[in-house]
């Protein structure tokens, strides 16, 4: 029996057009005649922000899709040479507990077995101890390739809409909370099975926002945003049938390419996507993408730091694009504007960008601007002069300044060139000072700090040396010159090739196929070849031995940005796109801080690559902690139930520091309590969340995923958690560390960590209550012992410990479970009785579901809304007043 649209949002008029499906020439697949059809992604109903609004996707191509999820037998047979510790009971079960990258590698192997080209490319792969692929360096998906791949979200939804039937699926009501053989439930008339239930499925797309629009051949977001999120579809054996929605796109928590769970698998697709379209989070569709090719680790290997950014002009859009590696994830954003943007350069502190509206080699009036280097390009400031072009930052006499020229036109005519001039202007506190001239002549390729040496390269390679303008390189044509930043006065540039140079033995080469270098006297001293079939453009010094440049293909398109190492002539690909111009690269050197004893790749960096979304919450909480620790009278520890349930601003009887974070468990609470709260605050009250259903967690459930991957916590531990306190530079480092606030997956901000009212909803249960106590007995006992030890420590420090049971959906009292994670109500009562025997104050706001937190105070089944947080905070405030 098919589920109704009311049950699952699946009727064809809402979710897509009918499609014809027939056997495919590829074994195990079906051919989907989708050309001319459409799918509806998302919903206009009440749903998560990432699932709204509904968006229409049209197809003008056909493709093939797997009849079933890939099985363990298929997965292992095709990758016999690969070590993988898969826990499969038999070959007919869907392969699960695999990462997105594992699915990609299998798809490539399948393509090769069919003698087809691969749809995915990468430069190297990383694996964990169990053989899972955790990263593919230089990963790129090629939609134009006719190969085996994962289905896009639109392709998956188009087919699923035809067969969607959560009731007749392996779900929480019939699965015994375990995976089942593929196609062992009801098989649809088209031969497609398990699109609802059994295991959730990876699809090809990065997770991005939807828009109320129509898009053709949709391939997802151009990238995964700051959190690098992926899309999951279909529901699993642990989900109730009524909770499986065709429009759902993920799991309870953030899903990234390296995520793996025992209920996540995949099915395959085959075929090219012609003229694929990506849509960014602003609702703009494009057939082009900007793809980071270098990982943050590769950047660190080159520069010694993750604190690095690339800025460049996207010639296709005319806007400024930024790749930020600072979080340990290569995130991309574009600053949109109506201004022309050329020659962007990043300020010495990495926080601002200067650019001009005029470009090298073109005469005419140009304006110079500075703006913040964020997604909105805020605080735009214009230099009030008649004309200013090609800015370059400089620190001079302790002040940050900008050097610019009055005209960037070509310099062939000496008299015309010397009529222009080079200027310096101070920039402080977001404002320009008064400009002053330092040289006659437009030396836009760089000047030294004293203004006595300058370079210009646009038609001729000119140099200002000791007050004299001279032409180097035999007067031959040159361009893209850049003066070194290390005081050595080395100059690099490009020329038009074809012949050897006087006094320098080198092979002949084509236009821009060599980066040439001259010394301070204009003598040619070295050359660096471009990769085969490419030429250089837009070369700029980065450091004493690193050079950034664009690479142009044979058709003249600026397809890549690369880093050239002058020590070994190696070329590292950084970014790929259609037209990438005028790149500039910034990285933070160890001497850029007032406290040079701190390692700023680690100090205060509590969130970085590979850490789940819960770690981002905790990164924000650590900033709050170090900022407010001296005033704190009460500290709260716990999961997102505490994070959203207590409003610091509404607490009146002291200063509350709320350190609750998503997935916060007893291991994390204990770590924060012992090493931060006790060592750095004088708080006399500490609130510890005691949610009986969360007692099943252990170190590896949540805490180790944050702690073991966080440079900040490991750095603090290495320094014994700073028994003598931390410096102002340390606190500044915490505040400056990466915090991608535009990637929040729930409707709150870090200025107000509170949720809107959407009601309790259904009492979701993720585990079989009859099995929880048996499976997690050791974890439950260990967490009880941790709480006892926290009580002892608190008493020794004259601190009152308050065990808080936050309110959950009152409808749980109609089930056999205490809450979301499945512990039985009888076991929960026994745990509560155990806690009552401890030396603490129990604040039970759940009361086994018999509480007064109505649906108007809830966001979902286990989180309060802002209204509920107001009531809980008032009651905690009142309790502490009585305890004082």
Image (cartoon, rainbow, N blue to C red):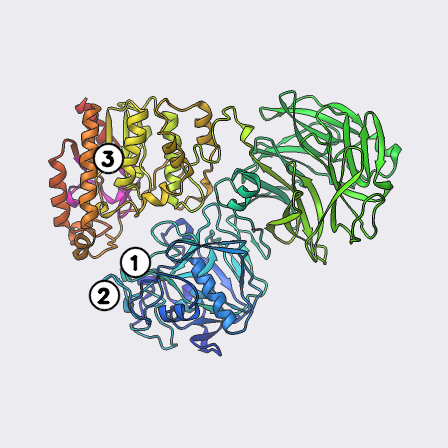
Residue at the (80%, 49%) spot, across then down: 496
* Label 2 sits on residue: 174
Rendered view: 400 above or below 108:
above
* Kind of element beneath mark 1: helix
**Which of label 3 and label 1 is nearer to you?**
3
Query: Disc 3 or disc 2, which is closer to the eye?
Result: 3
The percent position of residue 549, horizontal first and vertical second, equals 67, 45
Q: Which residues are magenta?
A: 843-872
Where, by quadrant of the figure, is residue 342 drawn? Answer: top right
Q: Position of residue 815 (x, y in %)?
A: 17, 54
Mark closest to the chain's N terminus, 3 or 1: 1
* Disc 3 to disc 2, C-alpha distance: 36 Å
Relative to 143, does residue 137 appear above or below in the rendering? above
**Residue position for label 1:** 243
N-terminal of the two: label 2 or label 1? 2
Q: Nearer the viewer, residue 114 or 819?
A: 114
């Amino acid at each position: 029996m098919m589920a109704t649209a009311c049950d699952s949002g699946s009727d064809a008029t809402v979710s897509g057009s009918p499609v014809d499906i027939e056997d495919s020439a590829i074994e195990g697949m079906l051919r989907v005649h989708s050309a001319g059809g459409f799918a509806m992604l998302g919903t206009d109903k009440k749903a998560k922000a990432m699932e709204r609004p509904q968006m229409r996707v049209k197809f003008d191509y056909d493709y093939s899709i797997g009849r079933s999820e890939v099985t363990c037998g298929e997965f292992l047979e095709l990758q016999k040479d690969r070590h993988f510790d898969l826990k499969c009971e038999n070959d007919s079960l869907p392969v699960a507990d695999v990462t997105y990258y594992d699915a990609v590698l299998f798809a490539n192997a399948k393509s090769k077995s069919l003698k087809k080209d691969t749809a995915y490319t990468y430069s190297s792969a990383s694996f964990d101890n169990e053989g899972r692929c955790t990263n593919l360096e230089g990963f790129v998906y090629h939609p134009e390739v006719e190969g085996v791949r994962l289905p896009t979200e639109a392709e998956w939804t188009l087919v699923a809409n035809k067969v969607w039937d959560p009731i007749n699926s392996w779900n929480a009501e019939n699965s015994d909370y375990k995976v089942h053989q593929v196609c062992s439930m009801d098989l649809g008339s088209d031969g497609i099975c398990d699109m609802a239930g059994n295991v959730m499925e990876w699809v090809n797309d990065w997770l991005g926002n939807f828009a109320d629009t129509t898009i053709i051949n949709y391939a997802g977001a151009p990238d995964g945003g700051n959190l690098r999120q992926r899309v999951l579809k279909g529901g699993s054996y642990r989900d109730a049938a009524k909770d499986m929605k065709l429009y759902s796109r993920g799991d309870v928590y953030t899903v990234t390419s390296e995520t793996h769970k025992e209920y996540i698998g995949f099915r395959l697709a085959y075929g090219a996507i012609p003229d694929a379209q990506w849509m960014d989070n602003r609702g703009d569709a494009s057939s082009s993408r900007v793809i980071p090719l270098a990982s943050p680790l590769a950047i660190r290997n080159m520069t010694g730091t993750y604190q690095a950014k690339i800025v460049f002009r996207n010639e296709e859009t005319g806007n400024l694009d930024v790749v930020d590696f600072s979080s340990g994830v290569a995130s991309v954003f574009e600053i949109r504007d109506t201004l022309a943007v050329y020659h962007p350069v990043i300020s010495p502190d990495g926080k601002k960008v200067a650019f001009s509206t005029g470009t090298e080699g073109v005469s005419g009036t140009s304006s110079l601007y500075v703006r913040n280097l964020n997604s909105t390009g805020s605080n735009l400031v214009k230099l009030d002069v008649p004309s200013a072009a090609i800015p370059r930052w400089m620190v001079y006499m302790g002040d940050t300044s900008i050097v610019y020229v009055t005209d960037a036109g070509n310099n062939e005519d000496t008299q015309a060139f010397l009529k222009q001039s080079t200027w310096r202007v101070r920039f402080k506190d977001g404002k320009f000072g008064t400009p002053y001239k330092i040289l006659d002549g437009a030396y836009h390729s760089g000047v030294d700090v004293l203004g006595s040496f300058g370079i210009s390269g646009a038609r001729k390679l000119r140099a200002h040396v000791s007050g004299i303008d001279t032409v180097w390189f035999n007067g031959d044509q040159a361009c893209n010159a850049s003066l070194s930043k290390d005081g050595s006065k080395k100059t690099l540039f490009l020329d038009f090739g074809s012949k050897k140079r006087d006094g320098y033995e080198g092979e002949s080469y084509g236009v821009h196929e060599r980066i040439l270098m001259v010394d301070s006297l204009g003598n040619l001293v070295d050359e660096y070849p471009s990769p085969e079939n490419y030429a250089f453009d837009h070369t700029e010094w980065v450091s004493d031995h690193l050079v950034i440049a664009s690479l142009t293909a044979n058709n003249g398109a600026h397809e890549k940005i690369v880093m050239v190492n002058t020590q070994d002539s190696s070329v590292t690909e950084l970014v790929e796109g259609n037209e990438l111009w005028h790149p500039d690269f910034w990285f933070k050197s160890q001497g850029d801080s007032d406290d040079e004893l701190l390692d700023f790749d680690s100090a205060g960096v509590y969130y970085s690559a590979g850490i789940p979304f819960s770690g981002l919450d905790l990164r924000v909480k650590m900033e709050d902690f170090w900022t407010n620790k001296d005033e704190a009278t009460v500290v709260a520890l716990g999961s997102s139930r505490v994070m959203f349930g207590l409003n610091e601003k509404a607490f009146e009887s002291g200063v509350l520091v709320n350190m609750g974070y998503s997935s916060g468990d007893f291991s994390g609470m204990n770590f924060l309590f012992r090493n931060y709260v006790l060592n750095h605050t004088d708080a006399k009250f500490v609130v510890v969340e005691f949610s009986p259903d969360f007692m099943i967690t252990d170190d590896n459930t949540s805490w180790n995923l944050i702690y073991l991957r966080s440079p900040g916590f490991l750095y603090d531990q290495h320094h014994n958690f700073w028994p003598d306190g931390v410096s102002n530079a340390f606190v500044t480092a915490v505040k400056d560390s990466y915090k991608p606030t535009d990637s929040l997956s729930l409707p709150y901000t870090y200025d107000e960590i509170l949720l809107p009212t959407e009601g309790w909803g259904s009492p979701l249960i993720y585990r079989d209550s009859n099995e929880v106590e048996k499976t997690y007995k050791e974890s439950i006992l260990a967490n009880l012992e941790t709480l006892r030890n926290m009580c002892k420590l608190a008493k020794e420090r004259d601190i009152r410990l308050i065990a808080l049971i936050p309110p959950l959906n009152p409808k749980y009292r109609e089930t056999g479970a205490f809450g979301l994670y499945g512990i039985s109500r009888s076991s929960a009562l026994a745990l509560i009785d155990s806690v009552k025997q401890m030396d603490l104050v129990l604040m039970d706001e759940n009361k086994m579901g018999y509480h007064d937190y109505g649906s108007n105070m809830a966001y979902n089944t286990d989180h309060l809304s802002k209204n509920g947080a107001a009531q809980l905070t008032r009651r905690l405030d009142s309790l502490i007043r009585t305890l004082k």
